[in-house]
Image (spheres, rainbow, N blue to C red):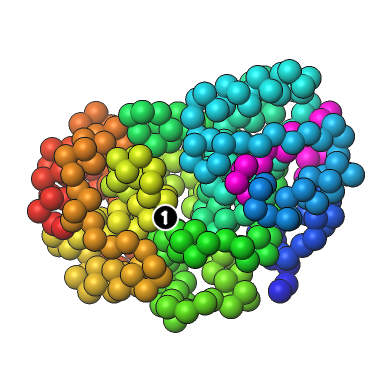
Amino acid sequence: MDVTTISVPLGPRSYDVCIAPADATDTAKKIAAALGKPTGVAALVDSRLGQLSPRVQPLIDALAAHLPGVRRLDLPAGESCKSLAAIEHTCGWLADNGYDRGAALVGIGGGATSDHTGFAASIYLRGIAYATCPTTLLAMVDASVGGKTGVDIAAGKNLVGAFHQPRAVVADPAFLDSLPSREIAAGMAEAVKAGLIADPALLDTLEAQAGAAIPAAALAKIIEAAVRVKVDVVVADERESGRRAILNFGHTVGHAIEAASAFQLLHGEAVSLGMIAALALGVACGVTEPGLLARTTALLARLGLPVDVKHRLTADVLDRVEVDKKRVSDTVRFVLVPCPGQVIIQGIALDELKRQLVAAV
């Protein structure tokens, strides 16, 4: 597999996303080059990954060979690391170990680890550098790119966070070899989203590959295409003042379903349901091509994702839509897709949105 480097040109906050099979030394060298000369480096590792993957400790050792003061901190596994209590623990650990404003963090894990690492870096001593090594498909295609960081609170998902761009993202698809099929499917949901909002060719590719084990080379191309979609949007609107909101397609309802499940659903599984709800709403409003709903539902099902959203739209879920980050007063900026590659952001009053969702699905 070739090395793919995608630049994220954001002026002084520019960085590269590198997608390549790499040994620990190559990855460490890329991160060291991007971080420059930090005074110390904290490697934040998803604890479950640390226990299961033989790739983690060699990567820590390689980082220690190329960067100063490398210490490892294992985070609570998965979404459980995305809490203010977990962030407080990390910041306290950084302070106890003498990390100063010249220090840097390296996140090794999935999307939750990327979010935790980026948010901790954004607030510790009012901001330090960080890089990420995404190890799940979802993190590679979405969560590790773009600088949106955050944690969950009882009211909802990602309601506390900051924009803080990494210095580098180094994704080694070899980490996916030991990933459970459920995690692979969850990552595919974000790839489907990228195809729907901006890359019809990616949607075609996913349809051609769905239903069987995807070859490594094809998977790398899917990751690359999804990352390019996100990079293009982020560069045009870094802080989500306009166009970047299209990346939230499927997330308004998806986040509510995910939180209502007490995070028993994976993020990608919830987004799958959220996209179906958004497409159904689009069809009901006369915005979305009716065939796109059936096409997308069939694709998501073939990828192993949940598609029965009707029974998920409980009163609890509908209430959680009210605390969505995209709410302004009593209106939610809802993302609709008329056809692949075309997006509309439509302000919908909360009461009307909830009524229309129930009627549409």
Q: In the displayed orientation, state which residue is furthest to the front.
A: 51
Amino acid type indicated by mark 1: Gly
Q: Position of residue 343 (x, y in %)?
A: 33, 58
- In the image, residue 4 lies in the stretch drawn in magenta: no
Relative to 108, say whether 294 is above or below: below
Tell me which corner region of the image, top left, top right, bottom left or bottom right, holds residue 295. Answer: bottom left
Q: Quadrant of the N terminus?
A: bottom right
Left or right of 76 in this view: 295:
left
Q: In the displayed orientation, state which residue is furthest to the bottom.
A: 208
Q: Which residue is mark 1?
A: 268
Is 60 or 39 nearer to us in this picture? Answer: 60
Please count the marks in the image. Answer: 1
Seen at 30% across and 40% down, the residue is 260
Q: Position of residue 273 (x, y in %)?
A: 30, 56
Residue stretch rendered in magenta on the structure: 34-49
Relative to 208, say whether 88 is above or below: above
Is 59 or 217 nearer to us in this picture? Answer: 59
